[in-house]
Image (spheres, helix red, strand yellow):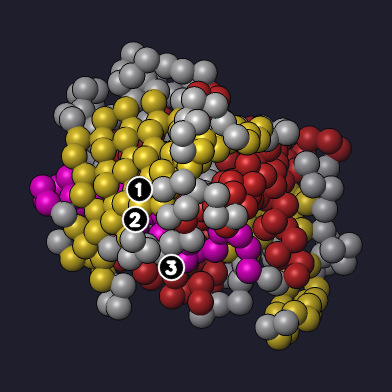
Amino acid sequence: MLNRRTFLASSAGLYSLNAAPSETVRLGVIGAGGRGSFVTAAFKRNAAVHVSAVCDVYEPNLERGVSLGSAGGQRKPRAYSHYADLLNDKDVDAVLIATPEHWHHRMVLDALAAGKDIYVEKPLCHTPEQGAELVAAEQSSKQIVQCGMQRRSYDLFLDAKKVMRGGTLGPVRMVRSWWLNNYLGTPRVTNLDGKLDWDQWQGPAPRKPFDPDRFRNWRYYSDYAGGIVADQGAHVFDGIHMLMGSGAPVSVTASAGKPHRPEFDTPESVTVAACYAEDYIAVFTINYAAMKYKPRQDQLTQFDGEKARLDVGREDLSVYPQGADDKPSSAYRSARGFSHATDLHVANFLECIRSRQRPTAPIALGFQSTLVVQMANLSLKHGRQIRWNAASQKVEV
């Protein structure tokens, strides 16, 4: 398929987009594991998307990604084992980056340099320094970057935002949130089903002997991620920021129990308290050593206003007025549920590729939500409150 340079006008001026003659967005997938496959399927549900290339360092994932990309009678995507080769592919307009967290920073920078639009999964990056660098890199580019904070496109949270703006709650000085699950009974992974390029998978992380559990459960090892508090907390704090209309926190304090999986070096039970210049505190508690709940009931965020309280779950919201807190005055349930939020978020990204408008979750907002949980982990490490200097874009420990 031939490539051309299309120029699209917008209120901000002229922007260039590499587009196929049919206006199809040609997607390259970097990371075709569980989440990568889920988001790829969301892209494929849009008729204007063609998956033209897939990259993964684990052969079963690569084979699955190629199969998914060619489903529905589409041409078979090119398979790559090195992401730089995919970025050099002239028949790729945009990339989905769904690798482990420790690779996001380098891959986003390289994708920007290659002139690709980017959909990158959360958390955005591994350290505050990486986040500040990514914000600056996006600002100096003309590329569209969407972070995988799908609550910003979700009908449930958009409806909740209307409630917040309506003034029903009165001033909100505290937000309380929790997320419950349990991973303690999951057996340690001792083997893989196919070939893995272990050295390439480790990438910028410290060198460690081959360990299948580190590959499968990377979220819980600090070499590759910020633990479960970062993995889930980034989503929760992003939703709080969205509804409260706030920026990054001024300070963060965290406490945690010890890890109860001996192979993991990040705790499963953590409480985070973040203070904001907008005059509120957000408290988030995650416990992955709890009883398991049904997905609709495993998480909740409560906005405590002076006049009423707003409860936002995974698929429902309710407003409880003062004096009648046993019965909601209004309620809303998402028509299509939480999984549809990713479809909505992908659709926003694709529309912004065409219009060159700002997406709902650009890097600056993705960094805000990631920064909170990074500061929480720094608080656990240093045993004290951690502050953010917005002027210098640096953490003060």
What residue is disc 2 on? Answer: 280
Q: Nearer the viewer, residue 258 or 30?
A: 258
Q: Pointers 2 and 1 in contact (CB under 8 A)?
A: yes
- The answer to whether the residues at label 3 and label 1 have Cβ atoms under 8 Å apart is no
Residue 86 falls inside the magenta stretch: no
Q: Is residue 160 above or below residue 371?
A: above
Percent coordinates x, y for residue 245 in the rendering? 48, 61
The residue under label 1 is 174
Nearer to us of marks 3 and 1 is: 1
Residue at 39%, 38% (x, y): give it. Answer: 177
Residue type indicated by callout 3? Leu
Q: Earlier in the sequence, mark 2 or mark 1?
A: 1
Instruction: Check disc 3 and report its element: helix, strand or loop.
Output: helix
**Left or right: 280, with 22 as reference point:** left
Q: Which residue is mark 3?
A: 134
The amino acid sitting under disc 1 is: Met
**Which is nearer the N-term, disc 3 or disc 1?**
3
- Marks 2 and 3 sit apart, C-alpha to C-alpha, by 27 Å
Between marks 2 and 1, how big is the CA–CA gap? 5 Å
Q: Magenta region: which residues?
A: 358-384
Q: How crowded is the residue under tag 3: few (<14 C-alpha within 10 Å), some, or many (20+)?
A: many
